Amino acid sequence: MDAHTYHGDMLENPWVTLDGSRGEGGGQILRTALALSVVTQRPFSMEQIRAGRAKPGLRRQHLACVHAAARLCGAVVRGDELSSQRLQFEPGPALVPALDIDIGSAGSTALVLQTLLPPALLAAHPIRATIRGGTHNPMAPSLDFLRQVFVPALAQMGAQVEIGCERHGFMPAGGGVATLHVEPHPLGALHRSEAGPVVRRRATAVLARLPTHVADRELEVVRQELGFAPEECEVREVPAACPGNALLLYAEREGGGCELITGLGERGTRAELVARGACQELRAWLEAEAPVGEHLADQLLLPMVLGGGGQFRCSPLSSHTETNIETIAAFVPERRPVVRRDGATWLVEVPPPS
């Protein structure tokens, strides 16, 4: 299905009006709106963008997503200025095959990829993109998460997606390089409702221009807290523009459910504290007995809505996910995901295409 024939019957009343302060009230509303606008060809206007935040309006990271989506489809944009709380986005009719985007800071390349990926999944031709910026950022998924958790879920739906990390980029210098390659392929349904036993675990301490004892201390905590064996732990040293550290904890369940927790080292924060926080997050996912974690639940909604639907079980349900559902309903109400509590977990169902 070509992105630009999707829900074309809505063009009689195309404009979508959004309140950027609702729900999660951050950049998630904007990224979802940009992706769905390109796919459905419905322009949107948004006001009160990030109105409740300490620095309201569009920041550099959000502008990078706006400009990436605009370049992808040749959109007409108004209000795309730093600190602007109003934006109008009118998508163009065709997707370009290749993009090279420089965020201009250590802003998250993963969030830009999230904006580009949904329309790229429905494009009639291959899409390639290179994004320069940060690859491991606070308050954003790491590229490792997208590659090891999100892409396998998309593959289960039939998508042909490759995400690469050519160079790591940490705060504050950035300098990372992420790549995206999407081949056209129909999107089927996704079903992940059962949490099978854990069949694989891995802990990776990533270091850039830091002494190896940082990684050794993190991995020692992982072995003590979660019982990882020495052969399940590794140290990976990478080149980067500035010193950086990320602890990656991966666990995979039988049947395909998997999770990757990223603990980011920060100046002044002990390695042991970084590792304990990451261990706590992974333990919570393991104890929840749900195949889909909090962050993957948020990211799966758009591909499922644009594809064959399906269902998944998760815990907990984040404000990002709830906001995503409301934004989806504004563009394609008939595909609105349905959420219901099922014991200690939530079951999220996306209706199939009519």
Image (cartoon, rainbow, N blue to C red):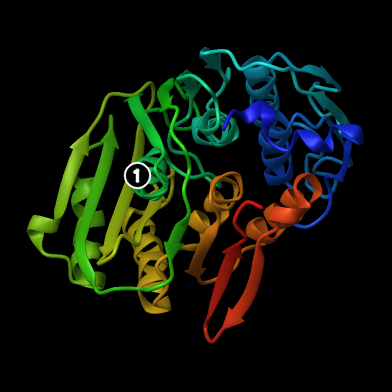
Residue 209, given in percent of the width and then of the height, sits at: 28, 29
158 versus 227 height, above or below: above
Say which amino acid is labelled 1.
Ala
Task: Please tell me which residue is depicted at 18% across the width and 51% down the height of the picture.
Answer: 216
Identify which residue, 330 or 286, lies in the foreground.
330
Task: Please tell me which residue is depicted at 39% across the width and 67% down the height of the picture.
Answer: 291
Q: Is residue 124 left or right of residue 142?
A: right
Task: Please tell me which residue is depicted at 80% across the width and 22% down the height of the picture.
Answer: 80
Q: Residue furthest bottom?
A: 343
**Dot 1 lies on which element?**
strand
Which residue is the site of mark 1? 246
Pick the quarter of the image with the N terminus.
top right
332 versus 100 height, above or below: below
284 versus 18 height, above or below: below
Neighbours of disc 1 within 10 Å: few (<14), some (14-19), many (20+): many
Q: Quadrant of residue 66?
A: top right
Residue 304, given in percent of the width and then of the height, sits at: 55, 51
Whether residue 120 appears in this view of the structure is yes
Residue 325, given in percent of the width and then of the height, sits at: 70, 56
Q: Residue furthest left?
A: 231
Identify which residue, 268 or 282, lies in the foreground.
282
Identify which residue, 13 or 315, lies in the foreground.
13
Q: Is residue 204 left or right of residue 88?
A: left
Task: Please tell me which residue is depicted at 58% across the width and 65% down the height of the picture.
Answer: 349
Residue 210, given in percent of the width and then of the height, sits at: 27, 35
Whether residue 167 appears in this view of the structure is no
**How many numbered badges does the structure rendering display?**
1
